[in-house]
Amino acid sequence: GQSLEQPSEVTAVEGAIVQINCTYQTSGFYGLSWYQQHDGGAPTFLSYNALDGLEETGRFSSFLSRSDSYGYLLLQELQMKDSASYFCAVRGLLRDDKIIFGKGTRLHILP
Amino acid sequence: GAVVSQHPSRVICKSGTSVKIECRSLDFQATTMFWYRQFPKKSLMLMATSNEGSKATYEQGVEKDKFLINHASLTLSTLTVTSAHPEDSSFYICSARPSGSFSGELFFGEGSRLTVL
């Protein structure tokens, strides 16, 4: 089976940097994704790591360590619009395998 | 980017009736689509994997006869909630991955909020 753990809530200040961690347990692993979801909206894709290391996309970066079954999402220069829920998601070993989501981290940003 | 359209966005129905939700990939083909259910401030719970031309694969605990999934073409999957009950009220979201894609990126529909009276 597959399970993911991430903090339920994180609070940070506008303009600061925040890191959201995710650990996972899977029977097979293909990659780790991150999604953002605002209240009432659909999830939107942020990043994907299939290999160890850091992937940078603008203010957002994502890191993966396959040996540690661990990844994180790093948000820099936080803006109020970044207030949302962030989900890590694991894709199984098979190319067309399902994607399982973590429980989500609610990010609160203070002015 | 790729667009997934989900319809209807909101639906209210009476107990005992059936409701059909459509999920369409507008500018790409999707061999596989996924249906999720989400409760307020909770995670996305995978209900089933919809495969074009074959039967859907349901997650443990999800009733196949209650949540009927049909993937009739490479751009359309439907979820029918049969004999709806108030506890079926929830936010249902579909997602699709372009055929042949190697990434973990899913494109999500806008979601359908179902309220069963």
Image: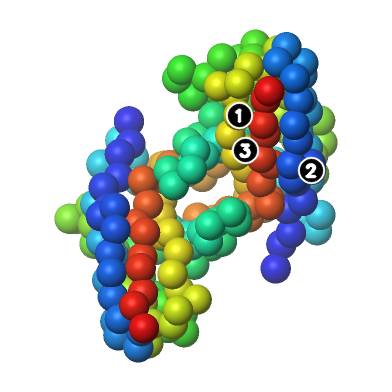
Which callout, 2 or 3, points at the residue further toward the start of the chain? Answer: 2
Q: CA distance from mark 1 to mark 3?
A: 9 Å
Q: Which residue is mark 2?
A: B7
- As helix, strand or loop, the secondary structure at mark 3 comes to strand
Which chain's residue wears label 3?
B
Residue B108 horizontal/vertical position (percent): 63, 52
Q: Do tag 1 and tag 3 residues touch (Cβ < 8 Å)?
A: no
Residue A68 is marked as: none
**Which three-letter amino acid code belongs to the residue tagged 2?**
His
> Nearer the N terminus, badge 2 or badge 1?
2
Give the residue pinned by disc 1: B89
Q: Is residue A25 left or right of residue A51?
A: left
Residue A80 falls in image quadrant: bottom left
Chain letter of disc 1 in the image? B
In this picture, is B106 found above or below A75? Answer: above
Of residues B37 and B100, the one drawn nearer to the viewer in this rendering = B37
Circle 1: residue type = Ser
